[in-house]
Image (cartoon, helix red, strand yellow):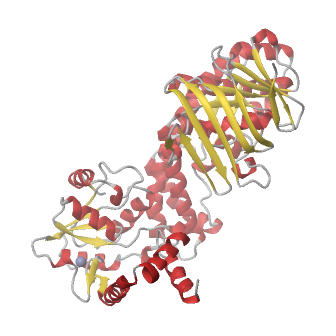
């Protein structure tokens, strides 16, 4: 193997779910077996790196300075905000078709063991949204475990008290210790329907 | 439950062995240090994937070997026959039950119960609270999935709070967020421990009566570190109030992770007031109580693993012990001499330097 090949393989190995063998296979495929695909992949990577951002309002994936597809959709109820940990959680809830409000992605949860504190979460923009008065209801769709629970508590303690926002937490039907991502659509729909008031 | 066969590879000093058992009574006979106890230890892993001798599974691997493996075939009251295979590596373990890989401890723990009687058991009377707590937690978690859940939730919340206390910049709000998760988990765990100790205590009194003559009644007494009603609100207030001290010590000083229980005789702590013989009888009775409780709760009779423990008893106590053992339970024993033939037909295996051979 050449130095450049090894450099590529090392870079691929850093990606989630890719080990040494897979990295080698992908590199060989790109460079030797199907080199015709390579320019399209490079272009796609470059374009995505240029344009994909976090939505300034909710933290979902968005392009350039534009809001994300959910925030841009005027038929959705911007007064009801579902708070999730990660973008894939949002995707899972969207797939269930059970929710017509908008989202806020925290990009994590409080996890002292992993060194994740409030400053590492996309929390400040959520508080700004609530402060602005646009939010009537918050649905906390965080995982049903110790860290999810602590994050819910922290968040509700920091909501501006002047705005009366209804806060509920989904939970019904979610396996204990489980997150939104691993629930199927039916479970997610019943979890959303059966959300309970958070106090 | 009865063990029908045991395959071991690279387990402690056993390179490779396959043993078949047909009856109820099995005995490994050999000199000290030959590996008799290693065989019992392997069977004991079936309960909770933990050794009754050490908390460190890496010690179970033969020197210079990457993995140790055991495969057991069992007759089981609930599932009929089962084949369990456990592979231990330095960095983890893999467990298969028939043709299904076991993904979570909660799906496995307690399904194949064993109760070990060993000379280390006296530490349950004399030893540290940590040792007693560990024994109680494993025994209870094996019996009650909810106990395991409560214990794991408590440990996770405690670990998070302790991480915050160790880091410099953690705010009160962050501590509070995890205390709100910790307090109900603690209340849940304390209530479950209290119930388990009460149930186990009742079985203990019955078992003790059968193996020790004497008027003094034994009891198990829970000594929770928070000596109040297990009420989440009160525990939360207590956590908030100890923040200053806990920040200073950089850890959660008090709580259910410091709980203890006492074995008493006639209302007095057996550690300080029990004779040597009373202490021995008490721990035997506690293990018999554990077996009776397992059976009552799950309908499965645990396999009893008697590690040379009876060698330390006088003849009268030994006889009483055997009379107290459930006559349907399989017993796998070790000894330096042949076991008492009046108890039934023993299947004898000779153990020498990790080699096991059946006696014809
Ligand atoms: Zn958005």
Q: Looking at the image, which is closer to me, B318 or B201?
A: B318
Q: Is residue A19 visible?
A: no
Direction from residue A127 to residue B177 in the image, left or right: right
Direction from residue B272 to residue A160 in the image, left or right: left
- On the image, the x and y values in percent for residue A72 come to 16, 79
The structure residue drawn at horizontal position 61% and vertical position 47%, both measured from the top left corner, is B225
Image quarter hosting the N terminus of chain A: bottom right
- On the image, the x and y values in percent for residue B127 come to 76, 41
The structure residue drawn at horizontal position 70% and vertical position 31%, both measured from the top left corner, is B116
* Location of residue A57 by image quarter: bottom left
Which residue reaches farthest front?
A33
- On the image, the x and y values in percent for residue B222 come to 61, 36
Q: Looking at the image, which is closer to me, B352 or B343?
A: B352
Task: Note whether A12 is above or below B39 in the view shown.
Answer: below
- On the image, the x and y values in percent for residue B35 come to 82, 37
Task: Note whether B21 is above or below B259 in the view shown.
Answer: above
Which residue reaches farthest top?
B342
Image quarter hosting the C terminus of chain A: bottom left
Q: Is residue A21 visible?
A: yes
Q: Quadrant of ligand 1?
A: bottom left
How many labels were placed on the picture? 0
The structure residue drawn at horizontal position 30% and vertical position 80%, both measured from the top left corner, is A125
Task: Note whether B173 is above or below B103 in the view shown.
Answer: below
* Location of residue B24 by image quarter: top right
Direction from residue A120 to residue B340 in the image, left or right: right
* Location of residue B339 by image quarter: top right
The structure residue drawn at horizontal position 29% and vertical position 88%, both measured from the top left corner, is A51
Q: Looking at the image, which is closer to me, B311 or B287?
A: B311
Which residue reaches farthest left?
A75
């Amino acid at each position: 193997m050449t130095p450049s090949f090894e450099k590529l393989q090392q870079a691929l190995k850093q990606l989630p779910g890719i080990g040494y063998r897979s990295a080698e296979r992908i590199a060989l495929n790109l460079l030797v077996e199907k080199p015709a695909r390579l320019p399209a992949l490079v272009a796609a990577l470059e374009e995505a790196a240029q344009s994909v951002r976090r939505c300034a309002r909710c933290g979902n994936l968005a392009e350039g300075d534009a809001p994300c597809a959910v925030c841009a959709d005027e038929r959705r109820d911007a007064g009801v905000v579902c708070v999730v940990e990660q973008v894939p959680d949002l995707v899972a809830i969207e797939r269930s078709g059970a929710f017509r409000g908008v989202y806020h992605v925290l990009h994590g949860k409080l996890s002292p063991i992993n060194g994740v504190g409030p400053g590492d979460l996309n929390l400040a923009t959520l508080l700004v949204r609530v402060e602005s008065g646009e939010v009537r209801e918050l649905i906390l769709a965080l995982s049903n475990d110790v860290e999810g629970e602590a994050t819910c508590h922290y968040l509700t303690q920091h909501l501006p008290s002047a705005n009366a926002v209804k806060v509920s937490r989904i939970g019904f039907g979610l396996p204990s210790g489980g997150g939104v991502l691993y629930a199927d659509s039916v479970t997610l729909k019943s979890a959303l329907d059966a959300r309970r008031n958070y106090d | 439950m009865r063990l029908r066969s045991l395959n071991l590879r690279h387990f402690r000093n056993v390179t490779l062995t396959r043993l078949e058992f047909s009856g109820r009574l099995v005995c490994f006979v050999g000199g000290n240090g030959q590996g008799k106890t290693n065989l019992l230890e392997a069977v004991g892993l079936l309960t909770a994937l933990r050794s009754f001798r050490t908390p460190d599974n890496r010690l179970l691997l033969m020197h210079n070997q990457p993995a140790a493996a055991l495969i057991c075939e069992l007759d089981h009251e609930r599932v009929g026959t089962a084949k369990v295979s456990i592979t231990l590596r330095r960095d983890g373990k893999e467990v298969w039950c028939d043709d299904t890989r076991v993904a979570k401890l909660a799906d496995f723990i307690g399904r194949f119960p064993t109760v070990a009687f060993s000379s280390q058991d006296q530490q349950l009377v004399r030893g540290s609270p940590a040792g007693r707590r560990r024994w109680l937690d494993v025994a209870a978690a094996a019996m009650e999935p909810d106990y395991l859940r409560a214990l794991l939730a408590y440990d996770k919340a405690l670990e998070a709070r302790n991480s915050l206390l160790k880091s410099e910049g953690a705010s009160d709000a962050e501590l509070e967020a995890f205390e709100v998760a910790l307090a109900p988990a603690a209340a849940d765990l304390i209530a479950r421990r209290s119930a388990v100790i009460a149930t186990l205590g009742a079985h203990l009194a019955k078992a003790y009566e059968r193996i020790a003559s004497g008027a003094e009644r034994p009891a198990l007494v829970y000594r929770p570190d928070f000596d109040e009603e297990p009420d989440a609100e009160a525990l939360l207030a207590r956590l908030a109030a100890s923040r200053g001290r806990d920040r200073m010590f950089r850890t959660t000083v008090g709580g259910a992770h410091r709980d203890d229980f006492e074995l008493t005789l006639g209302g007095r702590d057996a550690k300080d007031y029990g004779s040597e013989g009373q202490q021995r009888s008490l721990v035997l009775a506690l293990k018999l109580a554990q077996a009776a409780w397992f059976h009552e709760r799950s309908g499965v009779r645990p396999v009893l693993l008697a590690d040379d423990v009876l060698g330390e008893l006088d003849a009268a106590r030994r006889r009483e012990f055997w009379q107290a053992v459930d006559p349907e339970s399989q017993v796998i024993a070790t000894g330096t001499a042949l076991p008492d033939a009046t108890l039934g037909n023993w299947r004898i295996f000779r153990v020498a330097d990790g080699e096991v051979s059946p006696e014809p």
